[in-house]
Image (tube, rainbow, N blue to C red):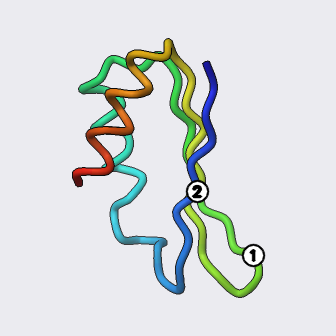
Amino acid sequence: MKLKITLAGPKVHDVGYRMFLLKNAMNTALPGLSTYNWEGDGRQQVIALVEGDEARIKAFLKKIEKG
């Protein structure tokens, strides 16, 4: 299963979102995570591409929604 997550706002770069996502992916044992910063439409974005089985992705989403 693959998932794309986008965090967007006026200031989301250099806040620690990428490290937060990485830490939670490692704790959930997700085999695939790729993150990068992007700017578009006058907004900053942190984009995460997640890959793994459905159960691990659901657990990952649950953890990041709490954080």
Q: Any mark on residue 6, and which?
A: 2
Along the horizontal axis of the image, is 23 left or right of 37? left
Q: Which residue is located at x 53 percent, y 86 percent? A: 10
Front-most of residues 3 and 33: 3
Q: Is residue 38 left or right of residue 51?
A: right
Query: Residue 15 has which mark?
Result: none
Amino acid on which the number 2 mark rests in the picture = Thr
Image quadrant of residue 37?
bottom right
| Element marked by disc 1 | strand
Q: Residues within 10 Å of mark 1 (few under 14, many from 20)?
A: few
Residue type highlighted by circle 1: Gly
Quarter occupied by the C terminus: bottom left
- The residue under the point 41% across, 71% down is 14
Residue 46, above or below 42:
above
The quadrant in which the N terminus is found is top right
User: Marks 1 and 2: in contact by CB < 8 Å?
Assistant: no
The picture quadrant where one finds residue 25 is top left
Q: Tell me residue 4's x, y (percent).
A: 63, 42
Report, in whole angstroms, how far the alpha carbon at label 2 lies from the one at label 1. Answer: 12 Å
Point out residue 62 in the picture as x, y percentages from the top left corner.
Answer: 30, 38
Residue 18 at x, y percent in the picture: 42, 52
Dot 2 or dot 1, earlier in sequence: 2
Point 34% across, 62% down: residue: 16
44 sits to left or right of 14: right
Image location of residue 28, percent across then percent down:
29, 23
Q: Nearer the viewer, residue 56 or 14?
A: 56
Residue designated by label 1: 40
Horizontal side, residue 38 vs residue 35: left or right: right
Looking at the image, is 9 positioned above or below residue 21? below
Label 2 crowding class (10 Å Cα cut-off): few <14, some 14-19, many 20+?
some
In depth, the one of 59 and 52 nearer the eye is: 59
